[in-house]
Image (cartoon, helix red, strand yellow):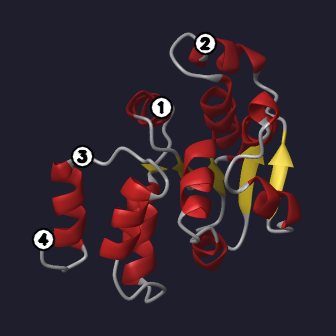
Amino acid sequence: MRRVVSNTSPLTNLAAIGQLNLLQALFGRLDIAHAVWDELNANGRSWPGRDEVARASWIVRQTPNNRALIRALQRDLDRGESESIALAVELEADLILLDEQDGRRLAQQQGLTPMGVVGVLLLAKQRGLLPAIRPCLDALRTDAGFWLGDSVYRLALQKARESS
C-alpha cells in the first residue's frame, strides 16, 4: 500500500480495543483530514485514539483543497467523511478507511477502495499480526460500542477461518 487515508471511526474503534498500532504495522503511514482531527476532539471530549493520534508521527494531518467536492459530499455525509474522501481523491490513495455505508458507497463512486475496521482486522490476521480476530470483534461490540451485525460477524470469522 502506498497511500492510505482514514476517517474517524476506524481510529476511534481500533483505539478503543487497543489495536490502533495495527494501522502503522499494516500501512506504515496514514493521512487524515483536519476534520477527522476535529472530530477526535469534538464536544470538548477526548475520544478514543485522540492522544495516540496526537503522538503518532506516522499519522499526517492534511487539509483537502477541493472545496466543491467536500460541499457536494456533505449533502449526504458528515464533515469528517467528506474531507476524508476528498483528501483520498487528491492523494490518489490506494485505500480509504471508513465504516459508514453511505461513505463507502460515495468513496467507491469517486474511484476509491474503502475498507472498514473489520477489513483491517482481517488483513492484520492474514499478515500474521493477530492470532485471531474473534476477540477483537467481540471487543468492538462490547468495549467500543461498535454496531456489528451478526451476518458480518459470522462472515468475518469465516473469512478468518475461525469457527463461527
Instruction: Indicate the amino acid at tag 2.
Output: Ala
Secondary structure beneath dot 1 equals helix
Question: Which mark, residue 57?
Answer: none
From the image, tell me which residue sits under label 1: 103
Cα–Cα gap, marks 1 and 3: 18 Å
- For the residue pair 89 and 70, the one nearer the viewer reads as 70
Up the image or down, 148 lies above or below 63; here it is below
Which residue position holds label 2?
72
User: Which of pointers 1 and 4 indicates the residue nearer the eye?
Assistant: 4
Closer to the eye: label 4 or 2: 4
**Disc on the earlier residue, 1 or 3:** 1
Quote the CA–CA distance across marks 2 and 1.
13 Å
Badge 3 is on which residue?
149
Q: Which x, y percent locates residue 45?
A: 77, 39
Q: Is residue 3 in sight in this rendering?
A: yes
Q: Position of residue 78 (x, y in %)?
A: 60, 22
Q: Residue at x 61, y 15 (%)?
A: 74
Give the vertical position of 71 relative to 37 (above or below): above
Figure quadrant of residue 53 = bottom right
Instruction: Identify the disc placed on residue 164.
Output: 4
The answer to whether 88 appears left or right of 119 in the picture is right
Of tags 3 and 2, the one toward the viewer is 3
Question: Which residue shows up at 67% across the image and 32% down it?
Answer: 80
Residue 59 lies, with reference to residue 160, above or below; the image says above
Q: Residue at x 61, y 35 (%)?
A: 85
Locate residue 86: give its quadrant: top right
Q: Are marks 4 and 3 in contact (CB under 8 Å)?
A: no
* Mark 2 crowdedness (10 Å alpha carbons): few <14, some 14-19, many ≥20: few
Label 4 – label 2 distance at C-alpha = 41 Å
